[in-house]
Image (tube, rainbow, N blue to C red):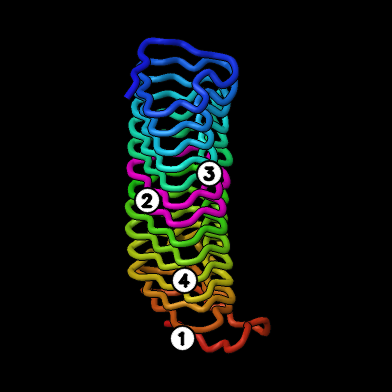
Amino acid sequence: MKLIANKEFGGERPLYCERDLRLKNVVIHAGESALKETANIEAEDCRFEGKYPFWCCDGFTVRNCLFTEGARAALWYSRGLLMEDTLVEAPKMFREMDGMTLRRVRIPNALETMWGCRGVELDDVEVDKGDYLFMHSSGIKINNLRLQGNYSFQYCSDVEIRNSVLHTKDAFWETRNVTVYDSVIEGEYLGWYSRNLRLVNCRIGGTQPLCYCENLVLENCTFEPDADLAFEYSGVQAQIEGPVTSVKNPRTGYIKAGSIGEIILDANIKAPGDCKIG
């Protein structure tokens, strides 16, 4: 593997189509597509300032690096990424990626990040300003994600999340096959139009959660007082520990809770309208 150490590059495509390359303490200054159409790349202790550095890459490792705000849209249309101990300040990262693992990564400006990605693993990742995180992505496994940002995981499928704290409204909108374990989810309109959403040992906050769901399952979850008007028009199987402020017009299934402050069943309930509540 060729080594480039302690060098600086800028301009257009300075390392275009490189193969089997290791970068150590390299700076990529303003410019575009520094490492486009590359394969088998390792980057360690590097700084990326220019746009689009890793596009159409096949197999690359990024460790202890910095992507400044200028390195926007840095990783698109690529495969086989391992990123560890890295700070990503740039927005619009990770688009149309196949096979990516992030460990101990911070993304403080994650606007429109991780769109259309497949085969994703996150462990110990912190995301802020993460509006629309993971839109249209699939095959996702997450442990210890701290997320601040709305509209997360919209239109995603085959997702497993553990030990995470998600502050996000409109999360899991129109998702398929999502399971969340041992996590906190705070934000209104959780899980609307989802199919096969399962929440296990989770704490849920925010108004009107879990409406229009199909095959919704809750196991040993708790609701915050503001999680009111829950389950409207949903098919649900729910075991909730402690009180629920209010339930409105669930469509079918059952809801068991420590107590329910208000049960609203009115003329607008949808068939079969046979949910057992108690």
Residue pictured at 33% horizontal, 44% vertical: 123
Vertical relation: 101 (above or below) 53: below
- Could you tell me residue 63's position as x and y percent? 34, 28
Q: Which residue is mark 2?
A: 142
Mark 4 to mark 1 CA distance (whole Å): 19 Å
Along the line of sight, the residue nearer the viewer: 154 or 39: 39
Mark 1 to mark 2 CA distance (whole Å): 33 Å
Q: Quadrant of the N terminus?
A: top left
Kind of residue indicated by mark 3: Gly
Q: Which residues are magenta?
A: 115-141
* Mark 4 and mark 3 residues within 8 Å of each other at the beta carbon: no
Dot 1 falls on a residue whose secondary structure is strand
Vertical relation: 238 (above or below) 71: below
Q: Earlier in the sequence, mark 2 or mark 4?
A: 2
Q: Earlier in the sequence, mark 1 or mark 2?
A: 2
- Could you tell me residue 138's position as x and y percent? 48, 56
Q: Which residue is mark 4?
A: 196
Dot 4 falls on a residue whose secondary structure is strand
Mark 3 to mark 2 CA distance (whole Å): 16 Å
Q: Is residue 142 magenta?
A: no
Q: Residues within 10 Å of mark 2 (few under 14, many from 20)?
A: many
Dot 2 falls on a residue whose secondary structure is strand
Q: Which residue is mark 1?
A: 276
- Could you tell me residue 100's position as x and y percent? 41, 44
Q: Residues within 10 Å of mark 3 (few under 14, many from 20)?
A: many
Residue 149's label in the rendered image is 3
Judged by depth in the image, the label closer to the viewer, 1 or 2, is 2
Mark 3 to mark 1 CA distance (whole Å): 35 Å
Judged by depth in the image, the label closer to the viewer, 3 or 1, is 3
Q: Is residue 130 magenta?
A: yes
